[in-house]
Each structure stands twice: as C-alpha cells, then as structure tokens.
Amino acid sequence: MKKIVFFTLLLQIMGSLQAQDLVIARQGHFSVGGQTLKHQGEYDNSKFVGWATQVEAGQSYRSDHAFVDFQIPANAHKLPLVYVHGYGGSGVCWQMTPDGRDGFSTLMLRRGWSSYVMDLPGRGRAGRTSAVTTVKPMADEMFWFDIWRMGIWPNYNEGVQFPTDSASLSQFFREMTPDISDHRQDVFSLNALAEQIGEHVLVTHSAGGFPGWMAAIQNKKVRGIVAYEPGGFVFPEGEVPETITGLTGGASGVPVSMEQFEQLLKIPIVMYFGDYIPETLSKNLGDENWRVRLQMARKFVEVVNQHGGNATLVELPKIGIYGNTHFLMQEMNNNKLADLLTDWLIKTF
C-alpha cells in the first residue's frame, strides 16, 4: 500500500512539473500604430439611421493598426522575438499547429524567448482598416495546397512533415483570413512596435519577409532577422539581379539606396528554406514559385556578404532535415526548427 501511495505521489509531482515547465511572467495584447480619421462637422446623437449605416459627421474612426499578442516567460532572454506572418494569414500561424501540437512561438517561449506575435493591419484581429476593398468568398484551397508545396492536389509530397489527416488540413485552411489592407501600414506598424518594446529580433514568414527588411533598414532597434522562406528581397541600386522568370510571375529584387542597404549589413540575418524546391524548371506552380525565390535568396546572401554583412542561408534538406513545406514552422518537426533557431540565437547574441 505504501508503494502504491509513493508512486501515486511521484506521478502527481512529475505531472505537476511537466505542467509548470513553461512559466509566463507577463502576457497580454495591444494595438500599435495606425491612425485616427475624423470627419468634419458636429456629431448629433439624436439621429439613428441603422447599426451598419451611420451619419459620419463629427465622428472618428481608428484604423490601420496592428494587433499584438505578447508573452514574457520567467527568466527570459534579453532580446524578444517579434513574429510577422505572410500573405493570407495572421499571427495565428506562429501560435498553433494544424494537429494541435505546440505552436512555434510556444516552443521558443519554452526555450526562454519572449514573443510578440503580430496581426498586420487589415488581417486577423487588426481588421479595422481605411482601405476600400471588396471581400468575397473565393474557392482557392487546392491552389494554395500546390503553391505551398504540400504536394500536387490531392496527393501529398512523399515524406511530407505536414500532417496529412483531413482534420489537420481543415484546421490549417481555417487559419486563413481575408486581407483587407493596402499594405502601406505594415512597415509603419513594425516600427511603432519597435519604439514601444525596444531592441528585438524579427522573425518573418513568406510575404512578411519584405516588410521585415524595410523595418530593419529604418529602425536600429531591430537587432537581427530570422526569415522563413521570405518572398521578396532588396538589393543596392545598381546591383539588382535580373528577374528570374517562373510560372507564377518570377522573382525580382527591389532596389534601395546603398545607405539603406548598409543598415542590413549591421545585423545578423539567417534564412531557412524547406524541401521540395527544384533547381530546374518545373511544370508545377509550387515548384516554380519557390525555385525562383530560393535562387533570389542565394543572390541576396551573396550580395550582403560581399559588402561585409553577416547573412546565412540554411536549406534544410542540405543539412539532413527533409519533408518541410512552405509552412515549415507549423509542421511535425517544428521542434527541430526551434532547436536550430535557438542555437543560432545563442551563438549570435
């Protein structure tokens, strides 16, 4: 009987320790950036024309801000991580996985790195925008399945790390959110967050990569950039590579002044690209979309380092990590990717 009680207590203690392995010292959310529009005239509170229709005279409208979820673990490292999502999504992509495992930001919290997860203006919980647009339902999931290199619909790529059950795929596509932004406020919101929280490392994904470069150019509080399959790149004027043509429009560099580009030379940069990216022309849209972007990434790293910067490109299959799609940070081996990032952060900072 004593042995049974002992083992019962031991199991309870072990379970308690496992439940407490991540201690959050502080958490919350806030909006950052944006503007307030004010209509001329005087507000008349005696008029009612409807809930969705208003007499706007004298009324204000706050818009174009970003939404930020933050968590600070106990005994956090000095530099927090700011997570920036890509096209068609929100910060949720960093916070969850389709099959219910820890999201990437949680994995990094367990390793002691504070997280600031953004919904960029006009997406997710930052949907109050000044842009005029039309939102309509569009059946596009098979297209994105291919573009994001999960496979060629309805077949998954062999050895894929994305969970292949139907429930996970449904959860994944339900992460997507309308994009009702004009994208003019993205860099402004990143800079506004930098002014509020101080020095940090940007962690970007896909279309979030380009505003990440621009934010680092404009704000010295960005101490480093981690880019997961960024979709666009900047180059010094006069050194922009020729456009690399492909089935989805190809990849072109964006020129910036040398003075601007030099800001990227002052910070460490690491980029991660996943699997299923061919070296030669393909008839598949997803293959082509990322073939040209990976080639442009190589050129970007080359130019940064030629000018004395510190940029590293990690192609995961070349270091023995296989099966990752474009959403590598959500996949079944995201723990390995968190370990890779942790090693880089510790060695770098």
Image (cartoon, grey):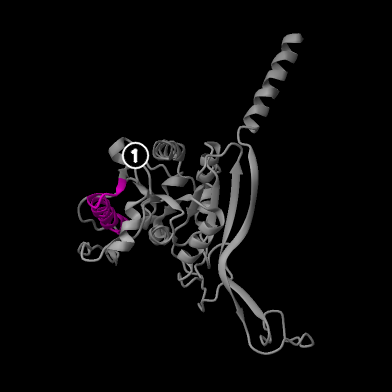
Label 1 secondary element: loop
Q: Find residue 183 and report its horizontal and vertical position in percent.
A: 45, 69
Q: Is residue 59 left or right of residue 225?
A: right
- Does the segment drawn in magenta span residue 286? yes
Q: Nearer the viewer, residue 29 or 315?
A: 29
Q: Is residue 335 visible?
A: yes
Q: Find residue 130 and report its horizontal and vertical position in percent.
A: 54, 76
Q: Is residue 174 visible?
A: no
Q: Nearer the viewer, residue 255 or 14?
A: 255
Q: Find residue 136 and report its horizontal and vertical position in percent.
A: 51, 73
Q: Nearer the viewer, residue 280 or 253?
A: 253
* Residue position for label 1: 322
Asked if residue 59 is positioned above or below residue 105 in the image, the reply reads: below
Quarter of the image that includes the N terminus:
top right
Amino acid found under the numbered disc labelled 1: Tyr
Residue at x 72% of width, y 19% of height: 9
- Does the segment drawn in magenta span residue 296? yes
Q: Magenta stretch: give its range.
A: 285-312
Q: Find residue 36 and report its horizontal and vertical position in percent.
A: 60, 75
Residue positioned most to the bottom: 41
- Which class describes the residues within 10 Å of circle 1: few (<14), some (14-19), or many (20+)? some
Q: Is residue 316 left or right of residue 246?
A: right
Residue at x 60% of width, y 44% of height: 72
Residue at x 30% of width, y 36% of height: 319
The main secondary structure of the magenta stretch is helix
Residue positioned most to the right: 46
Residue at x 33% of width, y 60% of height: 232
Residue positioned most to the top: 2
Quarter of the image that includes the C terminus:
top left
